[in-house]
């Protein structure tokens, strides 16, 4: 990838292809809806993603290989993230609350 090439976010396109709203994605990822909007507009996160892609290429690994989880017993009860299509098939969708907005500040 050339340094002169400017990255363009495909997050919105992938979210729409998955058939989910920004709100649903924000709940599943654990960030605010505003964060999803910013990611889709290419604010802040694209340069970090580009660097992570480069890091994975240099280390010849997948993104998932960059971190390891220290799993405690309480963590074993928490569901791991999975593709929205799998969640939808099982009918396990989290219904967003209609009345409250999350005030979480999320940084990537």
Image (cartoon, rainbow, N blue to C red):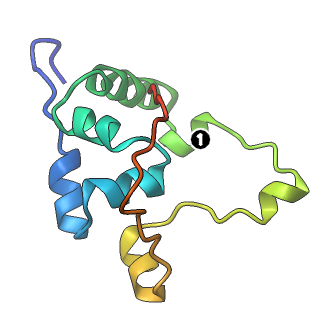
Task: Name the residue rendered at 27%, 53% in the picture.
Answer: 22
- Horizontal side of 48 relative to 80 (left or right) equals left
Residue 24 % position (x, y)? 35, 61
> Is 11 in front, or is 51?
11
Binning the other alpha carbons within 10 Å of mark 1 as few (below 14), some (14 to 19) or many (20 upward) gives few
Residue that badge 1 annotates:
65
Residue depicted at x 36% and y 56%: 25
- In the rendered view, tell whether residue 43 sits above or below residue 80: above
Frontmost residue, 81 versus 97? 97
Q: Position of residue 65 (x, y in %)?
A: 59, 41
Toward the bottom, the furthest residue is 90
| Front position in the image: 25 or 85 | 25
Q: What number of labels is visible? A: 1
Q: Quadrant of the N terminus?
A: top left
- Position of residue 22 relative to residue 4, above or below, is below
What is the x, y in percent for residue 78? 71, 62
Give the residue displayed 10% in from the left and 20% down from the top: 5
Instruction: Decide: is 39 above or below 17.
Output: above
Q: Looking at the image, which residue is at 23% across and 46% down?
A: 11
Left or right of 48, for residue 20 = left
């Amino acid at each position: 990838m050339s340094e002169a090439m400017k990255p363009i976010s495909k997050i919105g396109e992938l979210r729409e292809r998955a058939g989910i709203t920004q709100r649903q994605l924000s709940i599943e990822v654990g960030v605010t809806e505003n964060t999803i909007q910013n990611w889709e507009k290419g604010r802040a996160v694209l340069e970090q993603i580009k660097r992570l892609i480069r890091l994975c290429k240099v280390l010849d690994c997948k993104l998932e290989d960059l971190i390891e989880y220290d799993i405690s017993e309480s963590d074993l009860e928490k569901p791991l993230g999975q593709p929205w299509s799998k969640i939808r098939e099982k009918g396990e969708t989290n219904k967003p609350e209609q009345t409250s907005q999350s005030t979480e500040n999320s940084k990537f």
